Amino acid sequence: MRAPALIVENLRLKLCADRGDTTLLSDVSFEIQSGEIFGLVGESGSGKTLTALAIMRLLPPTIKATGKVIFDGVDLLALPEYQMRSLRGNRIGMVFQEPVAALNPTFTIGTQLICAVRAHHKLSGHKARERAIELLDMVGIPEPRSRLGFYPHQFSGGMCQRVMIAMALAGDARLLLADEPTTSLDVTTQDEIVRLLERLSKDHGISVLFISHDLGLVARLCHRIAVAYAGELVEVGHTDALLQTPLHPYTRGLVRCVPDLTQIGVLRGGIPGTPPMPGHWPGGCRFQQRCPLAGNGCDDAQVTSSLADRTVRCWKSAASVDTASIENTTSPTNGPKNLARNTTS
Amino acid sequence: MTDQSNAALAKDTLLDIEQLCVVYRGLTRRPVQAVADVSFSIARGSTLALIGESGSGKSTIARAIAGLGPVESGSIRIDGMELTTARDRAAAAGAHGIQIVFQDPTSALNPRWPVWQSIVEPRLRERLDRATQRDIAADYLGRVGLNTRHMDRLPQQLSGGQRQRVTIARALVSRPKLIILDEAVSALDVSVRNEVLVLLDALKKSEQLTYLLISHDMSAVAQLATTVAVLYLGKLVELGPATRVIGQPAHPYSRALIDAVPALNRTARQELPHLGGEIGDPAQPPSGCRFHPRCPFVMDVCRRDEPLLQSHHGGDVACHRAIEINTASSNS
């Protein structure tokens, strides 16, 4: 087994203000194998984007990060800023939600892409241009040579997102952080972008951290999934296992919310209530106010229990971890994600 | 239109749209025909969902019905009353019981007004006294699952889901017959979205409402819709009961659209070749079938002749090859 592309260990984020500190993220730990697409799901405010920004070290100075983010054997959180700059956008690329807003409307796609290429490689103008064309071709933009002269407004949202992905790959990216890259796009365009990410990870061995609030989408794309709730990860596991036997009550709620187009006219219902905001997290299990299983013992600090490839932060579900993972190794699941099991086993 | 759908139309139609055309004219660009000859009707108490990619004309139809956008030709009738000829179409739509709920509740509410004031705004001209107004607001807050605690809050003090509940309350306050939900749940988190869908379903029964649901979110459509209309580049390509259109879409575009949704379970059917390309430019729609440049089943006839809506398996489909394609895929 190769070394993981990224290891996040006990990542904690604290917002330091005059009124006191607020914890935004506590003890987030996960690993992404090389060539793996790793999904991070959760509702807004669960800390998904903060995790990505912390990995990229793009957080404002008022947010203090502790823990370890190990990429290529180096702890990114301990790197001096000038070394981080050589990694950011170079070995680690990032794609954001609003592709049209992320591009400068007054420059052509070519100018912006060539600029990104030359920021990471010492190339002549001509060579950089060739590289830009190659990148556009790689992300599936037809006639890349002529498209270099286009302005962002001449592109659709999906095409702009492809350009953003090309830019994120302009360096020598081994890891791509994709923060809700398809949220503002149509389902058909979303499908195209998802296929592109799949292809990049398969053909070029790029690892992807895919952040989304849509569990259905994450399940479609990712090999493994981490579920975030109120600043911590409540469950991590292989896609098939997680969907078939969700152990944490919150994951179960999310799985129930995934579209099921075979049931027409059936209301699926949500998880009542809203997630608590940072600073208002209850002691013990943070999901207890909304949890159907909440009872005695949920006020105590919740330890994560893990067995095989499954981690869950719920003491009531902890017992079922064993059985679930045994079932999982013996019975071949019929999902499309067979790759998921091969990457770590 | 077939005899069968005519019969259904006569039964108890609330909204009837016939041959609706919307053309946007600019000073410099050529006119854009955003909606072309769209006809459908919504039975009282049902939910019709309009689905399609962005640029297909979903919101244009919604705005035309609510009187907020232009209408080139065609007719929009609610309870038999023609709306397109009114001098002030927006006022006419409101007076005949059409309300609309938009996608973004934050921009739909006045940030400086407390919630109760926003809710009673549609009834301001009744010149009610303040206490009555507050009573009305409290009543409607209760109906949307909020309570009097929320009365004096400002929109920014509410969560996204609560804000959307407030805009729903505001739509309800003038006792509408039809509520247009223009991507009303799309901006919400999945769990909150499903909660709001439960609310909308309950309100439909308790307030005797009819919905026109406009959404790109197929999950919302599957949960609420009784009828589904699929639009492509301003044309209706498929219309039928939700179970049929979502369960067994007949038009290649509907199939591609529904197949693109990441969902857990699917009805097993032959996977379509992956749909490439993007929705075309409505200013220069393709000849013949507007979907032909992206269609995996394209033939010469598709490039030449525009297909008409024809009844097919309990719905209407506009595709030259619908029967052929669907028998082929059910056999294999």
Image: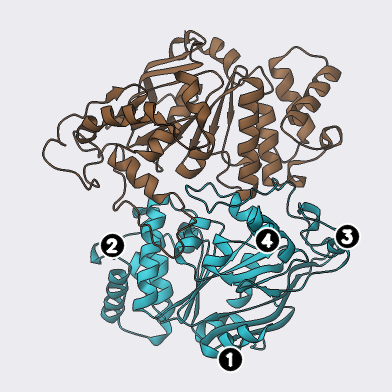
Chain colours: A brown, B cyan
What number is the disc on residue B300? Answer: 3
Q: CA distance from mark 4 to mark 1?
A: 39 Å
Q: Is residue A143 left or right of residue B252?
A: right
User: Are both tags, 1 and 2, on one chain?
Assistant: yes
What's the residue type where badge 3 is placed?
Asp
Q: Quadrant of residue B118?
A: bottom left
Q: Earlier in the sequence, mark 1 or mark 3?
A: 1
- Residue A45 drawn above or below residue B88: above
Which one is nearer the viewer's eye here, B116 or A175? Answer: A175
Point 56% across, 21% down: residue: A35
Point 30% across, 36% down: residue: A247
Q: Is residue A286 left or right of residue B222?
A: left
Q: Are marks 3 and 2 in contact (CB under 8 Å)?
A: no
Residue B288, percent across and down? Answer: 84, 65
User: Are both tags, 3 and 4, on one chain?
Assistant: yes
Q: Earlier in the sequence, mark 4 or mark 1?
A: 1
User: Are both tags, 4 and 2, on one chain?
Assistant: yes
Residue for badge 1: B81
Q: CA distance from mark 3 to mark 4?
A: 19 Å
What number is the disc on residue B326? Answer: 4
Observer-side mark, 1 or 2, equals 1
What's the residue type where badge 1 is placed?
Met
> Crowdedness of circle 4 by 10 Å Cα count: few (<14), some, many (20+)?
some
> Crowdedness of circle 3 by 10 Å Cα count: few (<14), some, many (20+)?
few
Observer-side mark, 3 or 2, equals 3
Secondary structure, mark 4, is helix
